[in-house]
Amino acid sequence: MESFSFYNPTRILFGKGKIEKIGKELKKADLKKCLMIAGGGSIRKNGVYDQVCESLRENHIEWIEAWGVQPNPTVEKVREMITLAKESSVDAILAVGGGSVIDSGKATAVGVFLNDIWNAYTEKEKITRALPIFTVLTISGTGSEMNGNSVLTLSAEKKKWSISSSLLYPRVSIIDPSVQNSLSFQQTVNGAIDAISHILEYIFMNETAIATRAIDAGLIKTIVKMTNRLQEDAKDYVARANLAWSATLALNGISGVGLQGGDWACHSIEHAISAIDPKIAHGEGLGVIFPAWIEYVSEREPDRFSWWVKEVCGEDSVARALRKCRETLKRWGSATNLRELGIRESQLPEIRDLLLTYGPIGEIIRFRAEEIEALLMLAY
Ligand code: NZQ
Ligand code: ZN
């Protein structure tokens, strides 16, 4: 088994009714005023916003609000939030929403101490300080509620890049799965595919992390089963709760222990796709790219995929396993090729060229221009 370091300082409060604890958590940390960051308004409709406000009020925490974070969040919007955070002298960030809101919250937390937040993503400035980050999660998938990553897009240059820092772990994250009942099935599926993809980025790296891969196989199967149950009944609490916790575990460090940091080619490729068209949800994009990547890489290294074929998919060949994956995606109503995502063939060179500006792509196979082209054609 490869050597590793494991770190995760985030405290999770999980379950029905836990949102009312958020004010107390800020108070316990001796914080007085936070910037509440939110998306397009779903938290007003499902009651999460009211629960958060009531809890802050009861615990005498002052707050100001920054709304309007969009899926595939932008640096431009985060810059506005940093200005607001500085002007109002907040001492904490409270992100209430999904990965896009949380990632914007994390960027704001470090951005108040930088000349410009994008410099952190280009590594021109080092992350040395951050405001304390608290989150109330409303859609499971990214794992951002319990990791140190943030992904933002610089719209002007279509660059969707990420940062990782131990300073970006939320202090406390609240996960009340029942508030996810208001998600459409499509959004639930986007989160599920993203969580599965996080595990897939790790499991092909080596065969010696036996314990980790056993956990990972269990997580993938659970995510698939729970998503199937939610397709039948969106209010199935047991399914929501197990999907939510599996998604958190899929990218909080646990699923990658001993797996050499993972491959991450598919994430880079998907990030270029949703940078080109921000209407494309990250999870749905991964549902197209990952099967194509497995098809492509398994032609060169078939043995690398044997464990996954048998233990995760219960099949006897990569081809059958991939057919099963694509059938599942279709049954869930998710895209299985780039055309269904709305990408035109004429956009493929743009995706390739953009990706080449992202830095090295992949570990198992280092993708150069020709390989990217071949993979995109397979996915098309
Ligand atoms: O904006 P609102 O109104 O909140 O609506 C959101 C949004 O339209 C809606 N939604 C969220 N909770 C809801 C709800 N609708 C009804 N009921 C609820 N309970 O769902 C839509 C999608 O939200 P978003 O936050 O964009 O989704 P997700 O959590 O999938 O985040 C995706 C972003 O995270 C990045 C992705 O690239 C993408 O930008 N990632 C972040 C990672 C990380 N920080 O570790 C890792 C991932 O690999 C990923 O790259
Ligand atoms: Zn992801």
Image (cartoon, grey):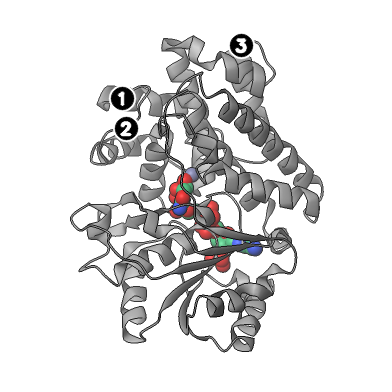
Q: Position of residue 22 (x, y in %)?
A: 60, 74
The answer to whether residue 279 shows anywhere in this view is no
Residue indicated by mark 1: 366
Q: Amino acid at mark 1?
A: Arg
Q: Residue at x 74, y 42 (%)?
A: 226
Q: Earlier in the sequence, mark 1 or mark 3?
A: 3
Q: Residue at x 20, y 69 (%)?
A: 115
Where disc 1 sits, the SS reads loop
Contact check, label 2 and label 1, Cβ < 8 Å: yes
Residue 361 is tagged as 2
Q: Earlier in the sequence, mark 2 or mark 1?
A: 2
The answer to whether residue 133 shows anywhere in this view is yes
Whether disc 1's CB lies below 8 Å from ligand 1 is answered no
Where disc 2 sits, the SS reads loop
Residue indicated by mark 3: 317
Is residue 37 left or right of 17 when viewed as pictured?
left
Q: Amino acid at mark 2?
A: Ile
Q: Real-space Cα distance between discs 2 and 1?
A: 6 Å
Please, is residue 303 above or below residue 158 in the view?
Answer: above
